[in-house]
Structure formats: C-alpha cells, structure tokens
Image (cartoon, helix red, strand yellow):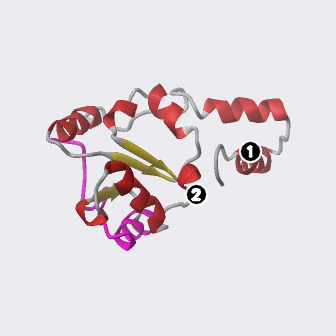
Amino acid sequence: YVNDGRPFWQYIVSSSTGCSDAQYFEEVYNYYTTDRAWHLCDPEAEKVFMALRKAGVKLAVVSNFDTRLRPLLRALNCEHWFDAVAVSAEVEAEKPNPTIFVKACELLGIKPEEAVHVGDDRRNDVWGARDAGCDAWLWGSDVHSFKE
C-alpha cells in the first residue's frame, strides 16, 4: 500500500472483524495513530538515542508503515530522536526492498556502507539492509537492549 493505506486497512479490518461499517473503520484506523494503541518498549530508549545523537550519530526510522507513522512518532513524543524517517508508504518500497534503506541513507546524507541498520526481522531488516549495502544487526541476537 502507499500513502495512508486506507483501502488496504479497510480490507484488513473488514476481513478480521466481519464489520464493514465506515464509521467503525474510521474509529479503528484513527485509534492506531494515537499513543493509546502503542507504547515504547524500553524506558531506556530515549537516553540511548539522545546519547547517540550527542555523539554525532545520525539516526533514522526505516519502517514498513503508512503515513500515520509521523503523527504516531509525535504522539509518542519520540519524533525528535531521529534525523530522518523513511516510511514504506511514502518511499513506495517495503523492506526488504533495498530502495527504502537507500532512501534512508539519502535522507541522512550518508552512503549505505556508512550505515548500520538495527531491526527485528532477519529477512526484512538484515537481508534488506545488506542488499542495500548497509551493515545490519538483528535485535535480540546482535543487539540485546537499550543500555548505554
């Protein structure tokens, strides 16, 4: 899907719930743009991201998501942690397609070989980033926590 992904999500909500009511869909769709639906998984994350930025490391989000990601990052008060956001719905390429990783590097003003991507999916994150020329680490295997 591209842009806000509404047709895709309408299909998912309708198929999953058996309800095709437009108002119900809008409530569900909008709910997932709020901090009521999401939370940050590690309270140490902000300290680590701020330490990395202070050390001069450029940070980006690379995500298979729709255009609700930016408002969601604002709602979670973590948008300021990142120098760039590469969203699949905007880039029109989903991980593991190397295009989204290359776009993130372009947004950061770096070459892919200067980047390390940390993700939680071997196929989408590790293989995709490496196909783009980036190094890649798998969360839970190569990286275990947000400890400094």
Image: magenta residue range: 123-148
| Residue highlighted by disc 1 | 13
Q: Residue 52 vs residue 73: left or right?
A: left
Q: Residue 83 vs residue 55: left or right?
A: right
Residue toward you, 6 or 121 = 6
| Residue highlighted by disc 2 | 92
Whether pointer 2 and pointer 1 mark residues with C-beta atoms closer than 8 Å, the reply is no
Q: Which residue is located at x 14 percent, y 41 percent?
A: 55
Q: Which residue is located at x 27 percent, y 59 percent?
A: 115
Which of pointers 2 and 1 indicates the residue nearer the eye? 2
**In the picture, residue 43 is in which quadrant?**
top left
Kindly state the secondary structure of the residue where label 2 is placed: loop
Q: Is residue 38 magenta-colored?
A: no
Image spot of residue 73 (x, y percent): 45, 33
Q: Is residue 130 magenta-colored?
A: yes
Q: Which residue is located at x 37 percent, y 55 percent?
A: 106
